């Protein structure tokens, strides 16, 4: 049986040492740079015409812009729009990386926990810094829900703190686990086809995993989009907490 | 157009012509109904698949909220135990607190989802929302 984990292996392409840190150029780095390049070139090319009546490509770029802009505006209000570059970059980057991962033989960078954690950490620390810079110590009101009697505070405050600290964990875990699980499932079912083809009379059953693999591929495309959407939507929600602490 | 052969003025229809005309109107009506019906079915199917995709995303979100909070609680408790040398008591206490925090997360995420659904259905929660899971 082909190894379903094999596709997630990191290959060190170009050894590179940066001030004592291992900054080796790997296949993961390559696919992230590729995703950045593809997304940037697409958006630059699509908006190159700047036509009043958009061409097809320009329409796609505008739909992407409006999709993210509406999401952010709904979650944070008009003054949250200064975080649009962050949210839009996260959305487009995750979406492109996920979609590139759907190409056969390609590598899915978001299926590694460390990439998802790095992205979630950017959001987490942005929320912390913006929250304290904008609200000062009032940001700590986030941990003190209104309308709770004082004698409940020793229990409620730790719960709120844990709830707050669990955000980057669930934020990153979700993205990474979805991409990892989907690709493994796809690979396993594809492996079943090969095994059945080489198993004599059992070959009659091989269409079953084939149908499954087909359905999973469609599902994976949906998941690739949904995870980018969910990640950026939660980013908006967390940013809203930084801008308006206190529930 | 040929000249009318009887006494009726221009634009008048003979009974046979009227019958043909009415039949054609009826046919067109039926055709339109079919097209509208097909469009409606297509739209609701589109909404269903959108909703089920979202349902899956939300399901996964709920799970990860709960697990993440328990994990973080456990790690904090373990770290405090290690730092303060209190054996395993804080680990147990914070594991429980983490679980509670997970439930709080779930309730918040659920409320958010409820708001979104009521926004999507125009505030009418009594209206069935497309959901095609197999339970």
Image (cartoon, rainbow, N blue to C red):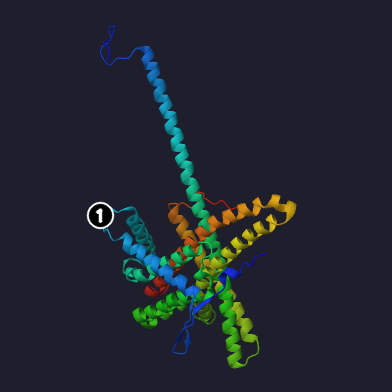
Q: Is residue A53 left or right of residue A95?
A: left
> Which quadrant is home to the C terminus of chain A?
bottom left
Residue at 70% in and 52% down: A203
Residue at 61% in and 52% down: A211
- x and y, in percent, of residue B71 in the image: 58, 77
Q: Chain of mark 1?
A: A
Residue lying at the far right of the rendered structure: A201
Residue B129 seen in the figure? no
* Element type at mark 1: loop
Question: Front-most of A173 and A147?
Answer: A173
Residue B39 seen in the figure? yes
- x and y, in percent, of residue A11 in the image: 54, 75
- x and y, in percent, of residue A69 in the image: 35, 63
Residue lying at the far top of the rendered structure: B6
> Which quadrant is home to the N terminus of chain A?
bottom right
Residue at 35% in and 61% down: A65
Q: Which residue is mark 1?
A: A52
Please rate how many residues cluster around mark 1, counting C-alpha atoms within 10 Å: few if below 14, some from 14 to 19, many from 20.
few
């Amino acid at each position: 049986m082909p190894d379903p984990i094999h596709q997630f292996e990191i290959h060190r392409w170009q050894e590179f040492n940066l001030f004592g840190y291992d900054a080796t150029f790997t296949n993961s780095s390559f696919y992230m740079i590729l995703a950045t390049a593809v997304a940037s070139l697409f958006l630059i090319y699509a908006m190159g015409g700047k036509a009043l009546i958009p061409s097809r490509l320009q329409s796609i770029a505008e739909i992407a812009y409006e999709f993210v802009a509406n999401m952010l505006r709904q979650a944070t209000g008009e003054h949250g729009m200064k975080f649009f570059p962050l949210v839009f970059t996260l959305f487009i980057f995750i979406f492109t990386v996920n979609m590139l991962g759907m190409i056969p033989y390609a590598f899915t960078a978001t299926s590694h926990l460390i990439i998802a954690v790095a992205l979630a950490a950017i959001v987490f620390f942005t929320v912390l810094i913006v929250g304290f810079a904008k609200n000062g110590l009032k940001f700590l009101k986030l941990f003190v829900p209104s309308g709770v009697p004082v004698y409940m505070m020793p229990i409620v405050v730790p719960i709120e703190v844990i709830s707050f600290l669990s955000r980057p964990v669930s934020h990153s875990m979700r993205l990474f686990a979805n991409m990892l699980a989907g690709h493994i499932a796809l690979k396993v079912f594809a492996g079943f086809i090969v095994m059945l083809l080489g198993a004599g009379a059992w070959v009659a059953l091989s269409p079953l995993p084939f149908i499954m693999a087909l359905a999973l591929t469609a599902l994976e495309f949906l998941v690739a989009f949904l995870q980018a959407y969910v990640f950026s939507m939660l980013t908006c929600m967390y940013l809203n907490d930084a801008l308006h602490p206190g529930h | 157009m040929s000249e009318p052969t009887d006494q009726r003025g221009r634009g008048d229809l003979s009974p046979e012509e009227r019958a043909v005309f009415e039949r054609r109107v009826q046919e067109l009506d039926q055709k339109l109904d079919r097209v509208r019906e097909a469009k409606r079915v297509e739209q609701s199917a589109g909404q269903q698949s959108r909703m089920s995709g979202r349902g899956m995303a939300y399901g996964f979100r709920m799970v990860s909220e709960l697990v993440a909070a328990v994990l973080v609680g456990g790690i904090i408790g373990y770290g405090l135990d290690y730092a303060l040398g209190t054996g395993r008591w804080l680990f147990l206490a914070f594991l429980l607190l983490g679980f509670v925090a997970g439930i709080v997360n779930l309730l918040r995420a659920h409320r958010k989802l409820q708001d979104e659904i009521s926004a999507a259905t125009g505030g009418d929660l009594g209206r069935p929302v497309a959901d095609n899971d197999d339970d």
